[in-house]
Image: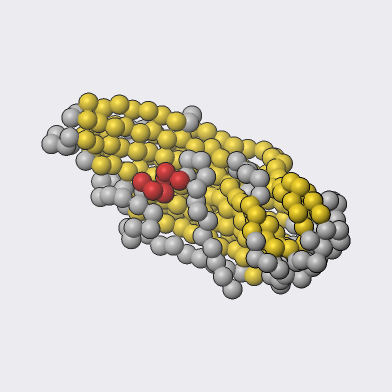
Amino acid sequence: MRTRRSDLGGPGLRRTTRIAGWGTGAAGVAVAVLVVLGPATFARSPVGPATGAPYAGMGVVLSTTWKVAGCGKASITSAPAFSPTTGVGGFGGSASAKGCGSPTPGDLGVAIAQIELTYPINTSATGRHTVTVVWSTILNGSATERAGRCTPNATAATASCDRIASAFVFGYATLIDATNGTRLPSSAWPGNFTTSETNTSCVFGTCTTTTTGPGSGTIVGSFPWAWSWSKVFLNATHAYLLDMVLYGGAVASLTTFAATLRGASASATLNSATGGNQESITSITVK
């Protein structure tokens, strides 16, 4: 049994985790919950055009991570789940941060859930093939960020304040040749997210503020998307494995450097698991 934490590198999130002191030992706890459903095996499943659920032989690893600092809060509102029988799963999380004068790394809430799927595939004809995994994401997410007022310390040459709220779903996939160990990443998927960030940078008391995002945004609805490997060479005598990682949740962060931040707040929620929301595989094809 194994776990993998994603690189947390989607738009609006990579910077969040860096400036907020992710992994620096600040107040907070990371929790991983691992569940394996079905054999994660290199057996050769008979996959052809438009293969849908049930996905026999699919392995499932589920994990959650949460972290808080200062006056931040975080919660996994829906534990990650996925059924190879139906091809349907999902997860949910919420996070908030409200300034309370805490030291660096500031006020932080992070709630992330992850689904990792392994699925064996094969081909009966050696040559160039296209492998496609079609997904449908139905979600309800929101992110709200209030800038407040950033005041640099009187003696500081440079100072800054950063406020971030983000709700997101991201992922990546790899086609593995289990016979010779080669790995090929899929086409990029931009993910689904709403993010707002306000940054104030000060030099000798003169400050400049920039805002990215709407301040308060939502992402609601149904979004079809796909991972694909176009015209890849597959050997009929080799065993292949799709390794697919889907993760999402919420981040809220308030950080300062040589400054005081008053009246700021951030909050975010993500739901792709309940009330008709879900993450589902529509089909897996090799042609």
Given residues 263 and 61, the one toward you in this image is 61
Image position of 143 (left or right of 73): right
- At x 63%, y 38%, the residue is 220
- Of 230 and 90, the residue lying toward us: 230
Tell me, what colour scheme is on the image?
secondary structure
Q: Exactly how many numbered labels are in the figure?
A: 0
User: Would you identify the image quadrant in which residue 161 lies?
Assistant: top left
**Furthest residue in direction left, as rendered:** 155
- The residue drawn where x is 38% and y is 33% is 198
Q: Residue 186 placed where, x, y %?
A: 66, 49
Q: Position of residue 169 (x, y in %)?
A: 58, 47
> Is 231 placed above or below 265 here?
below
- Residue at coordinates 71% horizontally, 71% vertically from top-left? 41
**Residue 133 seen in this snapshot:** no
* Image x and y of residue 20, in percent: 36, 48
Note whether residue 113 is visible: yes
Could you tell me residue 285's position as x and y percent? 80, 52
As drawn, 207 above or below 9: above
Residue 182 versus residue 275 in the image, above or below: below
Left or right of 135 in this view: 251:
left
* Front residue (pair 65, 140): 65
Instruction: From the viewer's perspective, tell me whether residue 117 is left or right of residue 199.
Output: right
Q: Residue at x 45, y 46 (%)?
A: 14
| Quadrant in which the N terminus is drawn | bottom right
